[in-house]
Amino acid sequence: MKIAPRDFAGKGLAYTLRSAQEEDASELVAVRLQIDGETENMDRERGEGFLDEAAFRELIRADSESERNLFLVAVANGRIVAFSRCQGSSLKRLAHRVEFGVGVLQEYWGYGIGKQLLQESIAWADEQGVKKMTLQVLETNEKAIELYQRLGFETEGVLKQDKLLSDGNYYSTIVMGRFAE
């Protein structure tokens, strides 16, 4: 599904949130690779689960046509600096929920872009009649956990020793959900 572009400003940065377009595909390849290499908060290391330009084009096309998916990008200073995605299911037993994921380039952390992407996704989900949004977050990502809680997400469970990070230690993943009011 697509949404209308919206402009935001905060902490000296102006940016636009809009639906991803097929023309964004090659830039999204680079942005995703960079984000994956900047933090261990993502599921992938840099280069893992690689999506090429054709795969991104297909993903964007499919998401644009689906009433249960939403693929957003944040554009600042003439380039994509973040993206988020809500993915639903066509299965009847799962059709009431979507899973949210987000990535922001490290140099754009602290501007509220991730929060705005989530708020736009929540508004979209509520408008679509989605009953539940889910997400997963690494236990050490305290700022994200606090944000999710402020926006109505609650902890539903913990996947113990779920991820092996570069320090050689295993960390848990927190499963969170937000239920429509």
Image (cartoon, rainbow, N blue to C red):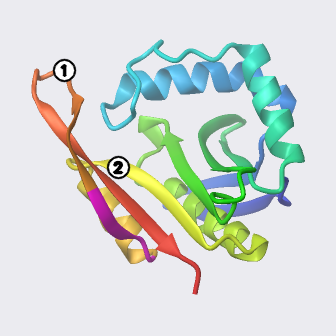
**Magenta segment boundaries in residue numbering:** 152-157
What is the quadrant of residue 123 in the picture?
bottom right
> Label 2 near label 1: C-beta < 8 Å?
no
Q: How crowded is mark 1: few (under 14 residues within 10 Å), some or many (20 or more)?
A: few
The image shows residue 123, relative to residue 47, as above or below, that is: below
Whole-percent x, y for residue 86 in the image: 64, 51
Q: In this view, does 78 lie above or below 10?
A: above
Viewed as shown, does residue 132 lie left or right of 61? left
Residue visible at 52% across and 46% down in the picture: 102
Q: Which residue is at 44% across, 77% downward?
A: 152
Q: Quadrant of the C terminus?
A: bottom right
Q: Please, which residue is most extreme toward the front here?
A: 93
68 to the left or right of 49: right
Disc 1 to disc 2, C-alpha distance? 17 Å
Q: Earlier along the polypeptide chain: callout 1 or callout 2?
A: 2
**Is residue 17 positioned above or below 152 on the image?**
above
Q: In this view, does 108 lie to the left or right of 38?
A: right
Residue at the bottom extreme of this rendering: 181
Amino acid type indicated by mark 2: Val
Q: Mark 1 points at which residue?
A: 166
Q: Read off the residue under disc 2.
A: 137
Q: Residue 118, how many percent across, how many down?
A: 56, 61
Q: Main secondary structure of the magenta part?
A: strand
Q: Is mark 2 on a helix, strand or loop?
A: strand
Q: Is residue 153 magenta?
A: yes
Q: Position of residue 122 (x, y in %)?
A: 62, 69
Instruction: Name the residue: 62% across, 73% down.
Output: 131
